Image (cartoon, rainbow, N blue to C red):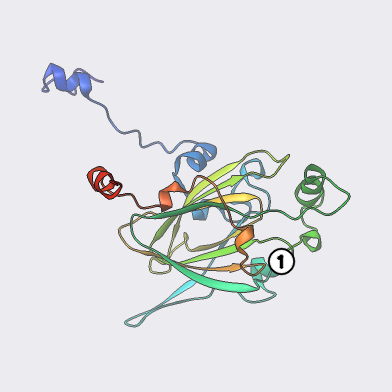
Amino acid sequence: MSDTLWKALSPLAKQELATRDYNAGDMQTKLHTGRADARELVGDALPAELRIPGVEVFHRRVFQQRYRGYFGEFARQGEGLLGKIGMWPKQWATALMYSGTSKGFHIHPPAIPEGTTPEAWFQRLFIDEPTNYALRPYDLEQWDCMFFISGIAEMFLIDERTGMPRKKMRFIIEGDDMPGPNNVGVVIPAGVAHAIRCASSKDLIMVYGTSTVFAPENEGRIAHGIETPTMPEDWEAFWNKA
């Protein structure tokens, strides 16, 4: 700290003084510390060495209708990013997260063909033949495609597939009620753990499609205790009395 700049403060205050570092750092630092925006991850904007294979972040257009509201498309079958990768959801759903709440981590089990190992399969699928989308077993494992309608989401992704580098991505997505470059869709492969935090004072509304229909046995949960509401300690003590 500059003694000249802060000379009018007491010795105690100067000793405790700190100033905020507004430098967001390099892209990897931003992805690990929550300083990345969705717009920085679209397409080839994110270097390959930082990308989780199979994860896709793609722009959506939200059209303002002055005096009326707004209109935004999710996806068209056979077109855009979902058309390119050959994925079309078999089930669509919606979810609302109250302000101050979080979901996850959740993870879906990858389907590994007989006669091969997970390591060899992922190597072929995402490293050796990454654009051979016909190889992807969308019908056998759950891939998610998420869109956010209202509020601000902070998304957390961790690659937990055997033999794959444990890459992490943490970034902000803005809902359609805030039209701009952070309006995106996100595709999440099976084997990639994902969590979402409502990152504003508004409730978060999302719509998501899945490549398979919902099956409880395919919903793995990791470090999900944040989803469980807790009672004040004195309430808990009274509640648990015999």
Position of 37 with respect to 90 (left or right) is left
Number of numbered discs visible in the structure rendering: 1
Task: Report which residue position mark 1 lands on.
Answer: 84
- Dividing the picture into quarters, in which one does residue 67 lie? bottom left
Position of 123 with respect to 47 (left or right) is right
Image location (x, y in percent) of residue 65: 39, 80
Image location (x, y in percent) of residue 189: 65, 56
In the rendered view of the protein, which quadrant contains the N terminus?
top left
The amino acid type, in three-letter code, at marker 1 is Lys
In the foreground, 206 or 218: 218
In the foreground, 88 or 116: 116
Q: At 57% from the left edge and 56% from the top edge, which residue is drawn?
A: 42
Toward the front, the furthest residue is 242
| Residue 170, above or below 69 | above
Image location (x, y in percent) of residue 140: 74, 63
Q: At 75% from the left edge and 55% from the top edge, which residue is drawn?
A: 111
Position of 212 with respect to 235 (left or right) is right
Q: At 48% from the left edge and 41% from the top edge, which residue is drawn?
A: 30
Residue 197, visible in the rendered structure: no
Residue 12, visible in the rendered structure: yes
